[in-house]
Image (tube, rainbow, N blue to C red):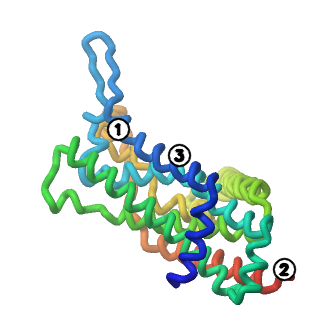
Amino acid sequence: MMRLLQIELHKLRYNRSVKIISIIYFILITFIALIASIEFNFGNFHFRVADQGIFNFPFIWHFNTYLAAILKLFLAVVIVSLMSNEYNYRTLKQNLIDGLSKKEFVLSKFLTVLLFSGISTLFIFIVSLILGLSFSDYNEIGIIFSDLEYIGAYFLKLTAFFSFCLFLGVLVKRSAFALGFLIVWNVVESIIYAVLNFRVFKDSDTAENIVQFFPLQAMSNLIKEPFTRLGVIQSAATQLGENISKDYGVGILNVVIVLAWTAIFIYGSYFILKKRDL
């Protein structure tokens, strides 16, 4: 496996666009720290974002992974372009001529996916840990390292999403078309959900129960929005007579669904290459 990963790292080393996009991605993740400095002043009323508990342990693991996952499209461009370059520069055909099997080729790409996901996960872990130690009101070891399931969910979410991008890159060959297909697929899932929720299964959870098996929705369900979990939001809702009851945890079913889609995307990539005349 190290040999396959070294082949991919060699390709990445001389790809300037990959380096630029990756640097931008990690810089944007770092910008999460700037949220701590946002302060609003309205006369005698002072509101500082960092004081609202968003950087408290263990909530910070949920909050930061949710925000960072929004930026995953930057690395999606990298994954898709890597596959597109294999076709454009005929390196795929050359690799096969040099003795690399199609199975090994797909495995090398999947190792790249795991590498990007792992580095991104480690980076968000370090950023979150530093912010938490700087601003959290709770610094007990047991509290700091609780809810780390969100870090695992973040890694799985990126791995599944990048595997989907890899599959689209293999299927479509052109990076622009692959990314376009990704956007269209997202719109299609939203339309299907809207039709099921507002037309077919009104006033029930049936629509949610169906769309949770769709790939992008399954990935989204791994890390649910964290904002209504904040104490200030909960208090405001209580004063308005509303009760926010929601399961914010990482569900086992969601994990299984995402793992299944990841396997489907990787095998699908191999199946397409196996059948395609290169």
Badge number at residue 278: 2
In the image, taking residue 79 as reference, residue 178 lies left or right, namely right
- Of the two numbered discs 1 and 3 on the same chain, state the one appearing first in sequence: 3
> Which residue position holds label 1?
233
Task: Residue at the far left: name it.
Answer: 140
Identify which amino acid the numbered label 1 is placed on: Ile
Badge number at residue 24: 3
Residue 142 in the image, given as x and y percentages of width and height: 16, 62
Q: Nearer the viewer, mark 2 or mark 1?
A: 2
Q: Is residue 261 visible?
A: no
At mark 1, the secondary structure is helix
Asked if marks 2 and 3 touch (Cβ < 8 Å), the reply is no
Q: Nearer the viewer, mark 1 or mark 3?
A: 3
At mark 3, the secondary structure is helix
The CA span between labels 2 and 1 is 56 Å
Using the image as rendered, state which of residue 150 and residue 102 is in the foreground: 102
At mark 2, the secondary structure is loop
Residue displayed at 72% across by 55% down:
179
Residue 166 in the image, given as x and y percentages of width and height: 66, 68
Identify which amino acid the numbered label 3 is placed on: Ile
The CA span between labels 2 and 3 is 34 Å
Asked if marks 1 and 3 touch (Cβ < 8 Å), the reply is no
Q: How many discs appear?
A: 3
**Within 10 angstroms of label 3, few (less than 14), some, or many (20 or more) residues?**
some
Rendered view: 32 above or below 96 = above
Residue displayed at 44% across by 47% down:
29
Q: Is residue 265 visible?
A: yes
The CA span between labels 1 and 3 is 32 Å
Task: Residue at the far top: name it.
Answer: 43
Identify which amino acid the numbered label 2 is placed on: Leu
